[in-house]
Image: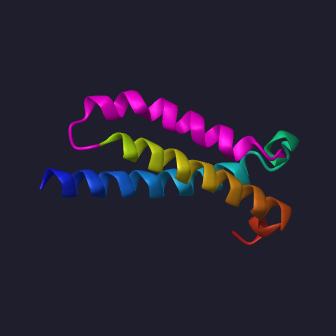
């Protein structure tokens, strides 16, 4: 039962991280040129995983894989938001 709870928490955190990162990049970083560099999603994803690692150590139901999943989702959200800016998809949302 504890493993199932950890799985639900991990995937929920990953989904929220992806959505929040994508909307933040589309709405707030629309005019920032630095977001268009190729290493930015990787760097942001690594930092998100690094920040969540101490939280993962405290919670018994969540594993280190959850932090990695969250970091990956945030990095993919930044990359997706960056692509939306380039293709000007933020105007319809």
Classify residue 85 as left or right of residue 42: right
Q: How many marks?
A: 0
Magenta span includes 54: yes
Q: What residue is drawn where x is 28% and y is 43%?
A: 62
Q: Quadrant of residue 56?
A: top left
Q: Quadrant of residue 88?
A: bottom right
- Our reading of the magenta stretch's main secondary structure is helix
Q: What residue is drawn where x is 31% and y is 30%?
A: 57
Magenta span includes 16: no
Q: Nearer the viewer, residue 4 or 89?
A: 4
Question: Residue 15: image x %, image y %?
Answer: 46, 58
Q: Residue furthest left?
A: 1
Question: Residue 91: image x %, image y %?
Answer: 78, 67
Q: Residue furthest bottom?
A: 92
Classify residue 87 as left or right of residue 75: right
Classify residue 87 as left or right of residue 24: right
Magenta stretch bounds? 37-62
Question: Residue 41: image x %, image y %?
Answer: 69, 46
Q: Residue furthest front?
A: 65
Quadrant of the frame with the N terminus: bottom left
Classify residue 78 as left or right of residue 88: left
Question: Residue 93: image x %, image y %?
Answer: 69, 68
Q: What residue is drawn where x is 38% and y is 46%?
A: 66
């Amino acid at each position: 039962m504890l493993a199932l709870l950890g799985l639900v928490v991990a995937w929920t955190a990953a989904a929220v991280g992806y959505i929040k990162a994508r909307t933040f990049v589309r709405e707030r970083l629309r005019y920032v040129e630095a977001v268009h560099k190729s290493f930015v999603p990787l760097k942001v994803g690594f930092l998100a995983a690094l920040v969540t690692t101490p939280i993962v150590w405290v919670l018994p139901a969540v594993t280190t894989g959850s932090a990695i999943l969250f970091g990956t989702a945030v990095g993919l959200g930044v990359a997706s938001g960056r692509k939306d800016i380039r293709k000007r998809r933020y105007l319809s949302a």
